[in-house]
Amino acid sequence: MSRKLTIVAFAAAVAALAVGGLAIRADEFTKKDGERWQKEYMTVVEKGRALWTSPTLGTNGVACAQCHPNGANTHPETYPKFQQQLGRVIALREMINWCIQQPLEGKPLALDDPQMVALEAYVAHERRGVALAPGKH
Amino acid sequence: MKKTAQFMLLAAGLVGAALAAEKATPSPPLGLPPLPIPADNPQTPEKVALGKKLFEDKRFSATGDVACANCHEARKAFTDSPLHVSEGIRRLNGTRNAPTVVNAAYFDSMFWDGRSPSLEDQALHPFLNPVEMALPSHEPILAIVRTDPSYATVFEQVFGKKGATITMTEVTKAIAAFERTQVTGDSPFDRYSFGGQSDALTPAQKRGFDLFVNKGRCVSCHLVEQTQALFTDNRFHNIGVGINDIQKDVPALAGEFLKAKATLAEVDKKVLADKRTSELGRFAVDRTLEGLGAFKTPTLRNVAVTAPYMHDGSLKTLRDVIVHYNNGGVTKKDDPVNDFLSGGIRPLNLTEPEIDDLVTFMEALTSPEYAGLPSGAGTKAEVKP
Amino acid sequence: MNPTDAGRRYFLKGAGALAAASTLPLSLVKLAFADAAQDFTFAYISDAHIQHIEGTKFVRNWDRGLIRAVAETNLLTPKPDFVMFGGDLAQLGSKPELDHGGEILSKLRHPLHSVMGEHDYYLDLGEYWSKLFGPHHYSFDHKGVHFVVLNSVLTYDEWTFNRWPTAEQRMLEMAGLDNPNGSPFMVGEKQREWLKKDLEAVPKTTPVVVFSHSPLQKIYKGWNFWTEDAEEVQAILAPFEKVNVIYGHVHQIQYNQIGRISFNAVMATAWPWPYPATYAQAESAMPVLTVPMNRADPFFERDATGWQFIDMNTGRVTMKFNLYNNTNRVVAFNPATGRPEDRDFQDPAKRIPPQDHY
């Protein structure tokens, strides 16, 4: 066949497949997918909230929420930044660990611990909508 | 072709200018920020040499045998280690441990209680203190520098002054200029943190560094930052050294002190004369409740070779220091902490191996210039009471 | 006015041995319009939140805050006429906590009066607290000023009596500042009636100072920076020429003027709370006047905590915040503008970075 004809035939075949409901290249997630994933996310946010108010994250009964009600004054939008208390530029979860060790007198979490992800998810969720300001003290 | 030649001449000129500029303002040692130099006291080699001569001149004392260098001896990293507290004329004791001059140029204030705002001002005081040089006034110093031929030409060369126009301003500027050359960095810690040498610290020292920044809680006052480390925050904190012994007397001592309405010169004399008043610390200078029992955070650079430790030299070794912090601000474990203890001090729950790691980390803060000096890490050397 | 018997018991425990020691001169701010003969001072320590861990262990951080406030208050010269404790001595209202806090307060060398806080109240509705500190609401006169102490942390009966299966659960629910299961504070009708009667005999020119744990304003409901019947209480106070409301609970510097009533919050000795505006998901009605306290450095446990001593001059309150690691703040009533103002930082041009770097 001629070059032009081949292309046309190919395009027609792709179109036919698409119409038939088989997207062969694009990841076309649906609205339902999005809603389902949002719910999945919120379960982790809720886990984070539970940890945030838990008196057993540390060893002295103090909970994050005692000083940070609704995660206020944690400024997740400013990370990574130079953290005065650690003497270097860090990510948010390192400061969470600092708080667990210092005011809560507990053991730091592993940086890839699902509990850490939950804590970050809760903090970020309570701060949603605030513009990023990385590096701000 | 013409344009290329012109360009090359220009480029050469720029490079030359850059090199000249670099020579005039040397870059600081590895791990230190740019050196603060006051606009009215620029560094020159001649001024520095004059300052060194003044620093070492024993004639500037009542008995003719005490110079700055007595308590700040160059070969001891500018301290009088292993003395607890310094000895002036006739071996009279003061109440405070001689801080090192090394890197003092980076302090915002001088002395353990910050009562002097600059190196220039600081130099004025020991000459007049009865337990240091004990001169009745600065006149004997001026008499010497104005008439001694080995000084006269230099003062004229450096400051354009001679005879009666030479004042303590010139004397202290020269001393300060000399002190500003005593800056050191490039320790194993610096090479590790800022020089990219991942093997400059031993594994124990790396563990110690981690403790320094995390469980040990040291870094908030003994600052280490992303590109440089002064190891001091230039602030004053009550960490429970000294004041614990006078807790019951604090109201009386503080009250007496304030009634005296002391001037700065009087504060200088009173705090070195009377140990109990000395323990009031920063309070003697700024009269705030904050300052009760508070002393300036010293730099930890070269700390391993400047034993003993704290404002009163009461802690013999670095290990003793860490144990004091580990106890939460008391030297003996179950002593009560004082009511005015800094909020930054609390029990650390360090294990014995962790304490050892911290101590060995602190040995990594010694610059090459002083690497040969004995370490105060765990020595149990006898010191004079 | 005599301190309550319970307060006196604690006072006497500490007094004897220390009476001879001299105290520290701290200069009082002398404001130009003050008539010195009428001046007196009192100290205000609040929100200690003594928290029991187990056995004889308490959270060291909060213990140290109260200990230091007491030690520094004892150094004041001239001596304050009395000390108010502003509420929330305990964290969960337990006997060990109230006893431990009471023991620390017993070292005070001055007469003590106390205000009820929700953390003291909701375990046993203030029964043990009363044994230590006296009635929940009361009034007294001192040097020409009428002082009223309200229990302003009550809430709806349904929540207090019917909602929770155990007293411990009820206390835990109220203890969470941001707990959506909480319930708004109020003075309540019964106490408002008592207040009306109490104030009937007081001349309208007599300065009135009201001590309350909750703000007697509506600032932010989500954190109970709120008094449900604020307007009704303010209406009862409105006829008086000079009214000062001093409140705790918020753990931060706040001040405001509504009509002829000045409002001043006090610092906590335990820990600071964020300003409501730092919670991005809700609106709040923070008093516009307030120059915020410096943002805290959590490394220093006492940062953004403190206590205060209060000058009464010509019937107005001057608050002197004694803040650790920070410049002390003075908030005084300015007769020219008719409202409390920060002596050093009210002018926006004079602010420093820690005050707006939230």
Image (cartoon, coloured by chain):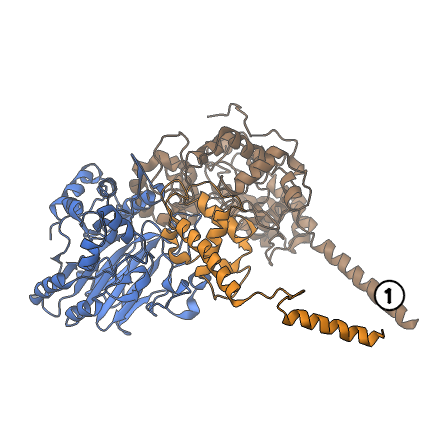
**Residue that lies at the very extreme toward the left in this rendered image:** C201
Chain orange in the figure, letter? A
Identify which amino acid the numbered label 1 is placed on.
Met
Q: Give the image quarter of residue B70.
A: top right
Residue B5 is left or right of residue C210, and the answer is right
Q: Residue at x 48, y 54 (%)?
A: A120
Residue nearest the viewer, comparing B347 with B321: B347
Quadrant where the image shows the C terminus of chain C:
bottom left
Front-lying residue, B36 or B244: B244
Q: With C242 as the anchor, is A49 left or right in this view?
A: right
Q: Is residue C38 above or below residue B126?
A: below
Residue at 37 percent across and 45 percent down: it is A55
Which quadrant of the view contains residue B364? top right
Placement of C315 over or under B273, stated as above or below: below
Chain containing mark 1: B
Farthest residue, direction right: B1
Which residue has dot 1 on it?
B8
Q: Is residue C284 visible?
A: yes
For label 1, the SS is helix
Mark 1 Cα within 10 Å, few/some/many (few <14, many 20+)?
few
Instruction: Report the front residue among C232 and B321.
Output: C232
The chain letter of the brown chain reads B
Residue C320: % across, % down: 30, 58
Q: Position of residue C314 (x, y in %)?
A: 19, 66
Chain painted blue: C
Percent position (x, y) of residue B74? Answer: 62, 36
Q: Position of residue A108 (x, y in %)?
A: 48, 42
Can residue B80 be seen here? The reply is no
User: Which residue sits at x=61%, y=29%?
Assistant: B374
